[in-house]
Amino acid sequence: MARPKIALIGAGQIGGTLAHLAAIKELGDVVLFDIAEGTPQGKALDIAEAGPSEKFDGSFTGTNDYADIAGADVCIVTAGVARKPGMSRDDLLGINLKVMKSVGEGIKAHAPDAFVICITNPLDAMVWALQQFSGLPTNKVVGMAGVLDSARFRHFLAVEFDVSMRDVSAFVLGGHGDTMVPSVRYSTVGGIPLPDLVDMGWTTQDKLDAIVQRTRDGGAEIVGLLKTGSAFYAPATSAIEMAEAYLKDQKRVLPCAAYCNGEIGVKGMYVGVPTVIGANGIEKVIDVKLSKDEQVMFDKSVDAVKGLMEACKGIDSTLA
Ligand code: APR
């Protein structure tokens, strides 16, 4: 059977890391696309030349022509600009919305059957715009944020409790921005919910609150350290986890920016929610029950995403 085809739209920091991870994991043949001439070709060749040492098979090509993504099974979109210190993800909206239009049209013309994972920020508004511009079904267009935000939360918790990250389960709901909602009640260590661990004296409520806030600020913390761009290792790993769930029909339960049809009180828009990813893309949005406090925080986050969608509509009147 032919290897799956993975198109990476954007060959910058995240795009290059995605290509390397896809190679190491032998997920399929990789096509890197970018508007910058030479960048996707150079990165593809560089990664292909790692094959003999890493012992992976597959074809790695770079292109500036959308025709070369034809028939892709998965498209992962990182095209656009990343933020610099002092910028919020929302500051990227104007530039990246235009990029989503050209990317959406490219995918529509050449890879209409692909499972599309958007990473470009501001994520929840960009994935919505990308779905509209591409016209692909909503279950096949999804945003990567929750896996990354949850991974950051899990990392901070594992360090606090001095336990393996494998045994920390957590998920983060809402928009991928300052209003995101790390779910304390639904996060566990070895199956023990975080509030119980506070009661058991493993940590204090203050320390837990600080970890929740650090999770919300996780992206900005890295932007502040790097100074020249934003995070790329963990974002790439998170998107690869989602791509693998789709390609291998793993039915993984992963938090993603998914199109909601009434789940958790959200209709007709994208926001971070727990989902099931398998061969049919987003196979289920999990209609998780929130407490009163959680619902208030979640609704605030949904409103922030709605504000970004309105800003997009103000820029591009074809968005409905
Ligand atoms: N079509 C294709 N590629 C484009 C386009 C376009 N219209 N516009 C820009 N690009 C390319 C750039 O040439 C660059 O190679 O997108 C790439 C972006 O790479 P980086 O600047 O390195 O950004 P990266 O760190 O990979 O982040 C990409 O993901 O997490 C988000 O906020 C982040 O929106 C940003 C995106």
Image: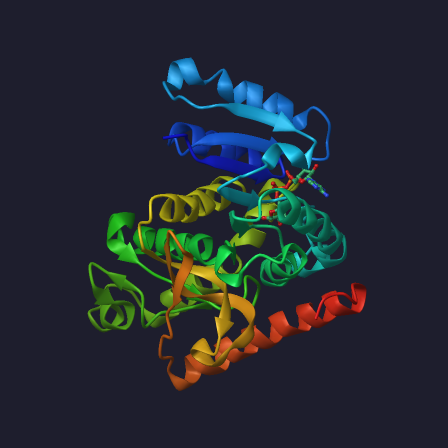
Indicate the quadrant where residue 124 lies: bottom right
In screen coordinates, is 263 left or right of 93?
Answer: left
- Residue 106 appears in the picture as rendered: yes
| Residue visible at 21% across and 66% down in the picture | 192
State the image coordinates of residue 55 (x, y, percent, origin top left): 36, 18
Q: Is residue 272 above or below residue 233?
A: below
Furthest-bottom residue in this view? 292
State the image coordinates of residue 195 (x, y, percent, origin top left): 28, 72
| Residue visible at 50% across and 32% down in the picture | 19
Q: Nearer the viewer, residue 110 or 272?
A: 110
Q: Which image quarter is the N terminus in?
A: top left
State the image coordinates of residue 25 (x, y, percent, origin top left): 37, 32
Q: Is residue 186 above or below residue 29?
A: below
| Residue visible at 40% across and 21% down in the picture | 57
Q: Nearer the viewer, residue 308 or 206?
A: 308
Q: Nearer the viewer, residue 172 or 136?
A: 136
Q: Is residue 197 above or below residue 24?
A: below
> For ligand 1, which image quadrant applies?
top right
In screen coordinates, is 60 left or right of 165?
Answer: right
| Residue visible at 68% across and 68% down in the picture | 308
Q: Nearer the viewer, residue 317 or 17?
A: 317
Indicate the quadrant where residue 123 lies: bottom right
Counting every numbered tag in the picture gives 0
- Residue 231 appears in the picture as rendered: no
Q: How is the protein colored in the picture?
A: rainbow
Q: Which image quarter is the C terminus in?
A: bottom right
Indicate the quadrant where residue 35 lies: top right
State the image coordinates of residue 114 (x, y, percent, origin top left): 52, 47
